[in-house]
C-alpha cells in the first residue's frame, strides 16, 4: 500500500493521523497544564530525598566511626 506523497514514510503518515484524534488533543492540553505541577513535585520530592540521604550519610559516618576503634 503506497502512502501519500506529502509524507516521507508510512510512519510519518500514521503520526499525522494520530495527531488529528481527539484523544491526542486532550492529552496535549492536559500535559501542557499539568507539566508545571509535575516539575515542582519532582523538585520537591528530590529535595526531600536529598535531605534524608544527608541524614543517613551523617548517621552512617558517626555510627561507623564509633565502631572503628573497637
Image (spheres, grey):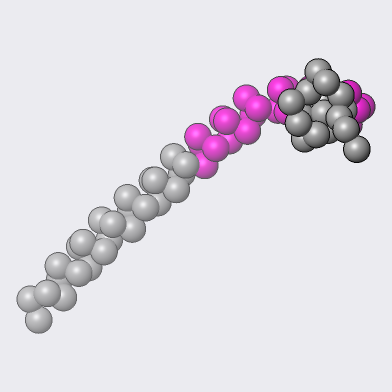
Residue 5 versus residue 18 in the image, above or below: above
Is 37 within the magenta? yes
Residue 60 counted in the magenta span: no
Name the image quarter holding residue 29. Answer: top right
Residue positioned most to the bottom: 70
User: Splitting the image into 4 quarters, where does residue 30 fall?
Assistant: top right
Q: Which of 21 and 5 is in front in this view?
A: 5
Task: Say which residue appears at 91% left-offset and 38% top-offset.
Answer: 1
Q: In this view, does 43 lie to the left or right of 54?
A: right
Which sits in the foreground, 13 or 64? 13
The answer to whether residue 27 of the structure is visible from this angle is no
Question: In the rendered image, which quarter contains the C terminus?
Answer: bottom left
Dominant SS in magenta: helix
State the residue at coordinates (92%, 27%). Answer: 22
Q: In which quarter of the image is residue 63?
A: bottom left
User: Residue 34 at what x, y percent from top left?
Assistant: 70, 28
Can residue 40 be seen at all in this image of the molecule? Answer: yes
In the rendered image of this protein, does residue 58 appear above or below residue 41?
A: below
| Range of residues picked out in magenta | 19-45
Comparing 25 with 67, the one in front is 25
> Given the current orientation, which residue lies at the most extreme front position?
2
Residue name at image x 50 percent, y 34 percent: 43
Question: Where in the figure is residue 69, as x and y percent of width and height?
Answer: 7, 76
Q: In the picture provided, is 18 more to the left or to the right than 61?
A: right
Amino acid at each position: 500500500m503506497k502512502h501519500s506523497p506529502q509524507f516521507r514514510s508510512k510512519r510519518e503518515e500514521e503520526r499525522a493521523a494520530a495527531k488529528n484524534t481527539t484523544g491526542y488533543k486532550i492529552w496535549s492540553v492536559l500535559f501542557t497544564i499539568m507539566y508545571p505541577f509535575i516539575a515542582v513535585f519532582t523538585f520537591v520530592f528530590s529535595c526531600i530525598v536529598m535531605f534524608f540521604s544527608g541524614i543517613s550519610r551523617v548517621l552512617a559516618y558517626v555510627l561507623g566511626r564509633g565502631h572503628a576503634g573497637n
